[in-house]
């Protein structure tokens, strides 16, 4: 058994199947992340603070800007390229993928639904990396069933003009404590349906709301927040999209979010493989490297297989989106498969590490924590499964 063996770089030929410009993009972004971002990870995880100053340079690669059309100030990249960017973000650092995902969702929603004034005030600074948004949909009583929210927005007029008064509490909102404004969803009782949901830009510079951070397990350099709106005044011009159609507005960006999370999970699986293979080839027990034991090989090969199949499912979802077809099923399948797979991969990588894998500061300990997030936001595994089941069987299990 030799310890100088280096694993093949593209053992299953997936990379060879990508267009050259996307392979080049991966090489460039991976090299940049390894040099400029990876050295910051340990400190940021320890202090629970994300170095936001790194964001604009990363947007130059196509993060956030890539998902927005050129006509709206973005790069208008295809989804396969965006998928590879998210994969590399996940491979480097789960919290980085979270930041990119939230800003992408905010930017896409504003690009698709914002007025020219809203785009000038919010989309342009987001794309420049000057301001950051958060996305506030779920509440304590409405998680998977997001439409059952209680928050309200009631129209009124005062000396400053027409406005809405927001009341309600949003829960588990990523990066609300570090964001400059939120895309907030609330019921508007005046709408025909007697309470259709609408989307609002709530700007911390002009509206009062309270944010508290909730300590959490995964993605330590992102924050999970409770956001309380107590008669919060929001100018009427901050209504986004059609009044009463806010849930449709929120769900229109759901495929991008699910694809991003799937590819972030693929990146974590690749990082699990990198770490497990390296450890297996260098750790000695019983007078030989543990990579020589068949049971250790089984774990490493299983991680490689999960990363490989997750990558294929994720790229297929991206290609479906690029083809302009209905990608909901492909994105749900990718989210369900990659989220479950990354948990198995991270468990196995930790096992390959033995006791050291449970110690804070080892890479697999972070990967294990970050992997656990994948099955919950952007629709839990069970919710994805029910979407797929409804499409395949023609029967809805929701209601
Ligand atoms: C780390 C993190 C970040 C998040 N970021 C944001 C954010 O930025 N913005 C935002 O708006 N929200 C965010 N969320 C909220 C997230 O979208 C919800 O947590 C998620 O949708 C699940 O809702 P819930 O937690 O209320 O769980 P519940 O809906 O209460 O689900 C509990 C369990 O029941 C299952 N379940 C529920 N309904 C069904 C059903 N019909 N059939 C079968 N099983 C079912 C679920 O799969 C789950 O296993 C975040 C959550 C987390 C954990």
Image (tube, rainbow, N blue to C red):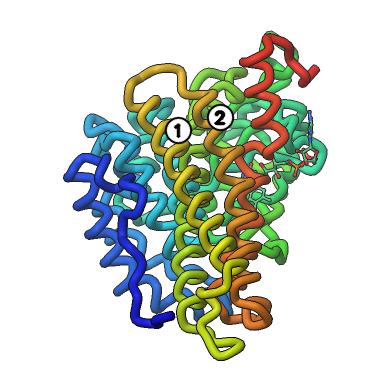
Q: Is residue 25 visible?
A: yes
Q: Mark 1 vs ligand 1: CB under 8 Å?
A: no
User: Is 112 in front, or is 340?
Assistant: 340
Circle 2: is it few (<14), some (14-19), or many (20+) Cα within 10 Å? many
Give how far across and how far down residue 127 sits, in percent: 32, 47
On screen, residue 377 above or below 108: below
Give how far across and how far down residue 89 sits, in percent: 41, 57
Q: Earlier in the sequence, mark 2 or mark 1?
A: 1
- Residue farthest along the bottom direction in this orientation: 287
**Residue 247 quadrant:** top right
Give how far across and how far down residue 303 sits, in percent: 54, 57
Q: Mark 2 vs ligand 1: CB under 8 Å?
A: no
Give how far across and how far down residue 380 sits, in percent: 68, 39
Residue carrying label 1: 109
Residue carrying label 2: 250
Secondary structure category for the residue under label 1: helix
C-alpha span from label 2 to label 1: 7 Å
On screen, residue 332 above or below 270: above
Residue at (51%, 31%) from the top-left corner? 331
Residue at (80%, 17%) from the top-left corner? 399
Circle 1: is it few (<14), some (14-19), or many (20+) Cα within 10 Å? many
Secondary structure category for the residue under label 2: helix
Residue at (21%, 40%) from the top-left corner? 19
On screen, residue 16 above or below 241: below
């Amino acid at each position: 058994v030799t310890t100088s063996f280096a694993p093949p770089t593209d053992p299953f030929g997936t990379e060879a199947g990508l267009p050259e410009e996307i392979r080049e993009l991966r090489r460039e972004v991976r090299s940049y992340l390894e040099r400029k971002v990876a050295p910051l990870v340990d400190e940021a995880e320890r202090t629970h603070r994300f170095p936001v100053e790194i964001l604009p340079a990363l947007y130059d690669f196509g993060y956030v800007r890539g998902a927005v059309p050129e006509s709206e100030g973005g790069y208008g990249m295809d989804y396969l390229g965006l998928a590879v960017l998210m994969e590399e973000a996940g491979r480097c650092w789960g919290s980085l993928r979270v930041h990119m995902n939230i800003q992408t969702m905010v930017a896409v929603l504003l690009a698709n639904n914002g007025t020219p004034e809203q785009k000038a005030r919010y989309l342009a600074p987001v794309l420049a990396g000057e301001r950051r948004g958060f996305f506030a949909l779920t509440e304590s009583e409405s998680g998977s069933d997001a439409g059952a929210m209680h928050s309200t927005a009631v129209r009124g007029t005062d000396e400053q003009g027409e406005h809405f008064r927001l009341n309600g509490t949003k829960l588990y909102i990523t990066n609300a404590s570090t964001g400059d404004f939120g895309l907030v969803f609330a019921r508007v009782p005046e709408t025909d349906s007697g309470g259709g949901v609408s989307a609002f830009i709530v700007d911390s510079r002009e509206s009062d709301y309270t944010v508290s951070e909730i300590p959490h397990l995964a993605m330590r350099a992102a924050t999970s927040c409770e956001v309380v709106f107590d008669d919060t005044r929001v100018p009427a011009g901050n209504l986004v999209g059609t009044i009463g159609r806010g849930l449709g507005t929120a769900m229109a960006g759901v495929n991008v979010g699910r694809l991003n999370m799937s590819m972030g999970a693929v990146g974590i699986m690749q990082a699990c493989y990198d770490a497990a293979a390296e450890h297996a080839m260098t750790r000695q027990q019983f007078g030989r490297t543990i990579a020589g034991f068949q049971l250790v090989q089984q774990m490493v090969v299983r991680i490689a297989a999960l990363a490989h199949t997750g990558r294929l499912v994720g790229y297929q979802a991206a290609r479906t989106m690029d083809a302009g077809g209905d990608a909901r099923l492909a994105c749900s399948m990718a989210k369900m498969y990659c989220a479950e797979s990354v948990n198995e991969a991270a468990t196995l990588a930790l096992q390959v590490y033995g006791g050291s894998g449970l110690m804070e500061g080892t890479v697999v300990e972070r990967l294990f924590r970050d992997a656990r997030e994948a099955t919950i936001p952007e629709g839990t595994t069970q919710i994805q499964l029910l979407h797929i089941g409804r499409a395949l069987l023609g029967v809805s299990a929701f209601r």
